[in-house]
Amino acid sequence: MPTYEYKREDGTIFEIRQGINDEPLATCPDTGQKVKRMISGGGGVVYKGDGWYVTDYKNNKQPANGESDGSSVANNETNNQTSSAESGSGKSDD
């Protein structure tokens, strides 16, 4: 349920929780004064923490934060060693 702000005739303000479809109050339930519902800015959105990004769920193979789990680096090193062994290092041990 949303919280609405009302202003009494004497200028004081109070809040009350009402359903969206409920009629606005005409009088204060505590004092009996005439009231007018005020337009407020609302609660807004509060983001806490690191949050999430659209890319978080696009690719399951790569972590979303850009960090590697080390497997791709290890695979690259293994491939490089295999390639250099097959092609020869160009050095001879004569």
Image (cartoon, grey):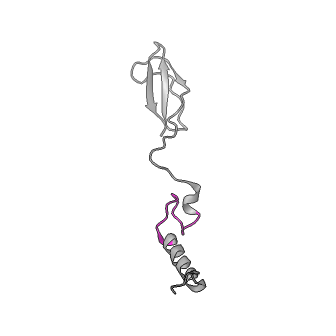
Residue closer to the observer: 29 or 51: 51
Which residues, given as a range, are shown in magenta?
58-71
Residue closer to the observer: 78 or 10: 78
In the rendered image, the vertical position of residue 54 relative to residue 20, given as above or below: below
Farthest residue to the top: give it.
Answer: 10
Farthest residue to the left: give it.
Answer: 30
Q: Residue at x 39, y 22 (%)?
A: 30
**Does 63 appear in magenta?**
yes
Q: Is the magenta stretch mostly helix, strand or loop?
A: loop
Where is residue 66 shown, x and y percent of the image? 52, 59
Q: Which residue is drawn at 58% across and 58% down?
A: 55
Where is residue 61 shown, x and y percent of the image? 54, 69
Where is residue 15 shown, x and y percent of the image? 44, 28
Q: Residue at x 52, y 71 (%)?
A: 72
Count of numbered circles in the view: 0
Residue closer to the observer: 52 or 67: 67
Residue closer to the observer: 42 or 10: 42
Where is residue 18 shown, x and y percent of the image? 48, 35
**Does 26 appear in magenta?**
no
Farthest residue to the front: give it.
Answer: 94
In the rendered image, the vertical position of residue 92 relative to residue 59, given as above or below: below
